[in-house]
Each structure stands twice: as structure tokens, then as C-alpha cells.
Amino acid sequence: MAVAIRLSRGGAKKRPYYRIVVADSRAPRDGRYLEQIGVYNPLLAKDSPERVKLNEDRVRHWLSVGATPSDRVARFLDAAGIKERAARNNPNKGKPGEKAVERAEEKAEKLKEAEEAAKAAEEEAKAAAEAPAEEAAEDKAEG
């Protein structure tokens, strides 16, 4: 029988309260469990000592017997110093998807074209301003 240390949800709607339980991995989330070894109240402040309560002796017993903690429970055990948890790293999580990359490239192209058009218009304006000044200088030279 595969045994898991996991959370079992209780509490009212929008007011969660969890029991930390040892259960058969095939049992339903809120169903039958072998033993309750702690509680977790996510509504309390993160620095509150009442937020996570664990019976460390029983946790150590179940871990020695071969129970596997869920991801969330593994975080609690790591914070309590009972079992070390390897930090996860997903460098692709923050990357945008294909469509977002395409949209960003199109936007960059439009900005580049707009900048080039603005430069061209500015150069034409300078050339137009210099042309009458050159004509005036030629008229003075002839006169």
C-alpha cells in the first residue's frame, strides 16, 4: 500500500482549513485517512506559528516507514527542518508563448518603420529649409 502525507481540505466555502494527514494514495482527497499529523490554516499570516502545526514525532515515523509527502507538505517539512527539499527551477515558466513572441516582433518592426519614416521626414524638412536659404544666398551673390 502506497502511503502519502498530504492535505485534506475542510472549512467553509472561501475559508479553507487543511488537515495534514497520512492516507492511502488511492483514497479520495477529503476521504478516509490513517492518521492526522498536523493542521494548516492558510488564512493566518505567514509568520504566525499557528499557521502550520506538525506532530514531528509522527511525521518522522511515517517518513521512516516510507510515506511520500506531497509538494505542499514537503515545503512544510523543509521549513520545519524535518526533511530537506530540493528547490525547483523552471527557467521556461516566465517565457512568453509563440503568439506573444510573434506579436512582439511585429510591434518592433512597426516601431522601426515609424522611426525610419520620422527620420526621412526630418531629413526632407531640413533639405527643404536649406534649399530656400541656398537660393537666397545665390541671389545675393548675383546681385
Image (cartoon, helix red, strand yellow):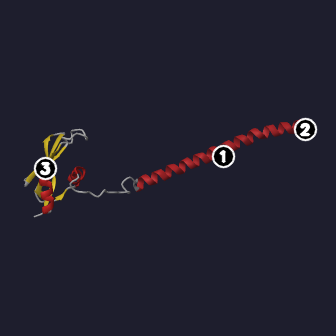
Within 10 Å of the Cα at label 2, are there few (<14), some (14-19), or many (20+) other Cα atoms? few
Q: Quadrant of residue 143?
A: top right
| Viewer-proximal residue among 25 and 76 | 76
Three-letter code, disc 1: Ala
Find numbered disc 2 in the image and state the secondary structure of the residue it sits on.
helix
95 left or right, relative to 17:
right
Mark closer to the chain start, 1 or 3: 3
Q: Quadrant of residue 97?
A: bottom left
Q: Which residue is mark 3?
A: 55
Find numbered disc 3 in the image and state the secondary structure of the residue it sits on.
loop
Find numbered disc 1 in the image and state the secondary structure of the residue it sits on.
helix
Where's residue 9, x and y in %? 14, 47
Single out the mark in the foreground, 1 or 3. Answer: 3
Q: Which residue is mark 2?
A: 141
Single out the mark in the foreground, 2 or 3. Answer: 3
Q: Is residue 28 visible?
A: no
Q: Which residue is mark 1?
A: 120
Mark closer to the chain start, 2 or 3: 3
Where's residue 111, x and y in %? 55, 47
**Would you say the residues marked 2 and 3 are in contact, meaning their CB atoms lie under 8 Å apart?**
no
Q: Is residue 26 visible?
A: yes
Q: Residue at the spot x=22%, y=39% of the render? A: 48
Within 10 Å of the Cα at label 3, are there few (<14), some (14-19), or many (20+) other Cα atoms? few
Three-letter code, disc 2: Ala
Identify whether 84 is placed above or below 17. Answer: below
74 left or right, relative to 106:
left
99 left or right, relative to 130:
left
Q: Residue at the spot x=11%, y=56% of the render? A: 23
Mark closer to the chain start, 2 or 1: 1
Q: Quadrant of the N terminus?
A: bottom left
Within 10 Å of the Cα at label 1, are there few (<14), some (14-19), or many (20+) other Cα atoms? few
